[in-house]
Every structure is written in C-alpha cells, then in structure tokens.
Amino acid sequence: MRARTARSALFGIWLSVSPLVWGQQASDAPAQAPAASTAPGKSIWTVGKVDFSGMADVYYSFNNNHPDAGFNQLYTFDDKTNQFDLNLIKLTVSHDPDPIGFRIDLGLGRAFDIFHTPSPDPAFFRYVEQAYVSVKPKGWKGFEADFGDFVTSAGAEVIETKDNWNYSRSLLFSFAIPYYHFGVRTSMPIGSSFTAGVQVINGWNAIVDDHGNNMKTIGLTGAVTRKKFTWTNTYYIGPQYTAVNNRNRALYDTVLLLTPNDKVNAYLNFDYGQQRRPFSGLDHWNGFAGAVRFQVTKHIAISPRAEYYNDSTGFTTGTVQRLHEVTVTGEYKVFEGLLGRLEFRHDGSNEYFFDRGTVPAAARSQNTVTAGIVAWFAPKH
C-alpha cells in the first residue's frame, strides 16, 4: 500500500474553530464616491461567479534520531527532517453548483509528491488534488452529484494543514485510508440531520486503473449532524487491482466530532481495513485516534492527539507491528490568513522500526519537533 484532502465535506464544520478566510475588498460604489464610503464591497478573489483561493505551507522539522535518509518515518507530507521544505502551495478555482458547478485544485510541493506516488495516468494529474464537475438540480431537495477526481470521504483529517488541528497527519490518515478517488459521488439530505451518499469509483488513489478496476468500487457514506456533534460513517469495498492481486479491499471509517462550545472541540476516529490475498488469507489493519482542540485565546490554540495503530500483517507499513503516537501542537494565528504552528510528536513501535543515524531499524521510537507557517487567501461571502 502506501506509506493519503479535503476529506468529507462534513469535516468543514471544523472550520468553526479554524482560522477564518480573509481577502481585500474593492468597492462597488461609483468612482465619484468618497474613499471612506461604506458601500458594500466585493471580494477581489471572486470574478463573476467564480471563486479563487489559495494557500502556501512551509515547515522545518527536527528528528532526534537524525536518520541518514533525511525522513521522518510514519509521516505523510511533512516527512523531510532536519531541513526546510515546501509542504504545499495550491490554487483553487471553483463555482458552487446552480445547478452546474465545478472545482479544480492545482498545486505542487511535498504533499502532491506523496499522494500521487506513483504518478497518475494521465501524468498531468500529479499537479491536481481535485478536479470535478458538480450537478445540483433545482427541486431535487438538496441532491448533489460530483463527477471526476475528488478526495476521499474517509478520515478525520484533510490534506490542507490549516483545516486540521495538528500540523502533522495521524497514523490513520497516513496508512489506514486512501487519499483520493476518481468516479462519481452523490449526497442527499434526508430529514433535518442526516445526509447519505453513494460513490462509484476506480478504487484507491487511481485516476485510470491500468489493471481494470475502473468503476468497480462502491462507497457508502452517512452523517448525522446535530448542534453539539457530528457522526460520520464511510464504507468502501471493491477489487483493488495490482500487478499481482485483484481481490477485494474493504474499509470502514467512523468519526465522531464533538463541538460542545467555541472553546473546546474533540474528535474520535476508528478505522478497520482488510485486503484479500491473491490465493487465500486476509491482510488487515485497524486503529483508533482521538484529539482535542483548546481555543485558549482569539489567537492561541493547543491541540493534543493520541492514537494506536495495529498493522497486524505488515500490509500497510511493511512490518508486523503495533504503533502508538502522541502529538501536542501549539498554534498562533497572527491574523486572518496567516498562522504558525509548533509541534512535538512521539512515535513508538513494539518492534525495532525507526532508523537511527546510518543504522536502519535501530530504534523503537522517534521524537520530532516541527515548526510550520501557513498562509492563505479566499473570497468573502
């Protein structure tokens, strides 16, 4: 498998405790109006009905094991250590369906290198996070369908750093679930608090599957949204074709997001996955993660995270092992559109898995410290 954006749209609720979007405004008032006019403004990041947004994310990481290869093992995206690196720079162009819409996310950086490894076919998609057309017919009571390349619905975290509570991604994000899919996804509100969806896709992390798994994987999504919590469930099943295997891969993911007030939020995330072997037997993996975000002041937040991950057959990490991870992230929001994060993370295994210096698999743990800066712009609505 691999050493995985935006995920479920319901995850956007987390933005209630994430930094708000910002943008300069140009007045719609006549030219002769005084400069101090309070006439309503329009965001310069919107042209007609098309929205433009973007972000840049850079970091420096330190690893106490000083691995000679220069990588933090078990990390996704911000995995280079003892050096500065560009995590992500991205431009998004979108139009909300009315009834037709679209979205395309273009970018580069370490994140794009990793979630498109190996490079997809067609090769241009190595610079694409998402590219899809949306249809939301009037009179269909909120039904929406997306056609194209979109991020997975599974998981408690997303690709964009600013929309997560921690700077680094969890073990579940990195190993238990996919990054993206190509195909069709739908969503339909049922009643006032439940949303259901069906997806027909090309499996895990594939634009075109060279081995024939095109539109043979099914995804089912469901979410209950209330004032104080959101509970999402995602299930994928279908043949995951490789050069040596065409058997079914299945994943169940569930996330409980707790939002009791503006100062404290929390989530619990569980994953169970399995892959049938070519002839007989089953590979499987499972894990549990939990995190809390404390909004200490308008500018300062602290987010601890802890998790356990069991790669019982070594299918996802390459080693039969039980992993644990503890992270504490401090955030300072300079202003709307710029934030800094400082993070300490401890990873541990019951096996000798981590490189130390020039010696591979010489340690059972690693400690890292990461400092990151994230800047972004988006239209005001």
Image (cartoon, rainbow, N blue to C red):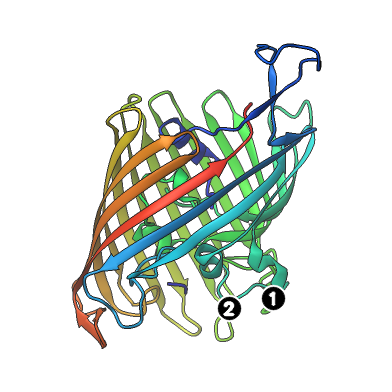
Specify whether 243 is left or right of 257: right
Q: Nearer the viewer, residue 106 or 144?
A: 106
Residue 135 percent across, percent down from the top left = 76, 40
Task: Give the distance between the C-alpha atoms of the residues marked 1 and 2, in whole angstroms.
Answer: 9 Å
Amino acid carrying label 2: it is Asn
Residue at image location 81% in from the left, 17% down from the top: 31
State the image quarter where residue 3 is shown: bottom left
User: What is the crowding at mark 1: few (fewer than 14 residues within 10 Å), some, or many (at least 20)?
Assistant: some
Q: Residue at x 54, y 43 (%)?
A: 376
Q: Residue at x 54, y 75 (%)?
A: 247
User: Is residue 12 positioned above or below 241 on the image?
Assistant: above
Q: Position of residue 241 (x, y in %)?
A: 59, 76
120 to 299, vertically: above or below: below
Give how far across and how far down residue 321 sits, in percent: 26, 74
Question: Would you name the residue on which mark 1 appears?
Answer: 212
Label 1 sits on what residue type? Gly
Q: Which mark is residue 246?
A: 2
352 left or right of 14 in image: left
Helix, strand or loop under label 1? loop
- Decide if residue 75 is in sight here: yes
Q: Secondary structure at mark 2?
A: loop
Whether pointer 1 and pointer 2 mark residues with C-beta atoms closer than 8 Å, the reply is yes
